[in-house]
Image: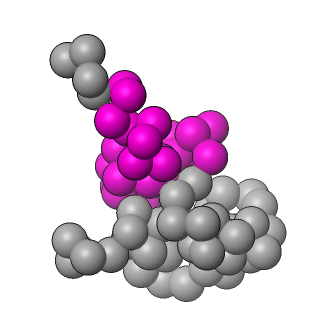
Amino acid sequence: MSATMSGIEQAIRAAGSQAKLAELLGCSQQNISSWLRRGYVPPKQAVAIEQATGISRSVLVDPKLAALLTAGI
């Protein structure tokens, strides 16, 4: 996957489409579209997306949150 693609873009590509990702997650395509516009997904959804697509949750969440979570490591 390209380093210039956001995590949600990578997940959409891995699933095949926004609609297919939404089906895998049991949510609406509108949710996926909203996350795509935002550039990241809610933390609660990151785990489910990681399990469904193999895209790491660390690239799916808000980069500020990811930085906070890894700061202590």
| Residue range highlighted in magenta | 42-69
Task: Give left or right: position of 19 versus 5.
Answer: right
Image quadrant containing the N terminus:
bottom left
Majority secondary structure of magenta residues: helix
Residue 69 visible somewhere in the drawing = yes
Residue 73 position in % (x across, y down) = 20, 17
Residue placed at 33% from the left, 75% from the top?
5
Identify whether 5 is placed above or below 60. Answer: below
Identify whether 45 is placed above or below 40. Answer: above
Task: Give left or right: position of 25 versus 59.
Answer: right
Identify whether 20 is placed above or below 23. Answer: below
Closest to the observer, 66 or 50: 66
Task: Give left or right: position of 41 versus 60.
Answer: right
Outermost residue toward the bottom?
Answer: 17
Q: Is residue 36 magenta?
A: no
Q: Quadrant of residue 31?
A: bottom right
Identify whether 9 is placed above or below 71. Answer: below
Closest to the observer, 16 or 67: 67
Residue 37 position in % (x across, y down) = 61, 75
Residue placed at 79% from the left, 69% from the top?
28
Residue 57 visible somewhere in the drawing = no
Q: How many marks?
A: 0
Q: Is residue 44 magenta?
A: yes
Residue 39 position in % (x across, y down) = 51, 66
Residue placed at 57% from the left, 54% from the top?
41
Q: Quadrant of residue 22?
A: bottom right
What colour-coding does the image apply? one colour
Residue placed at 26% from the left, 23% from the top?
71
Closest to the observer, 10 or 16: 10
Closest to the observer, 49 or 43: 43
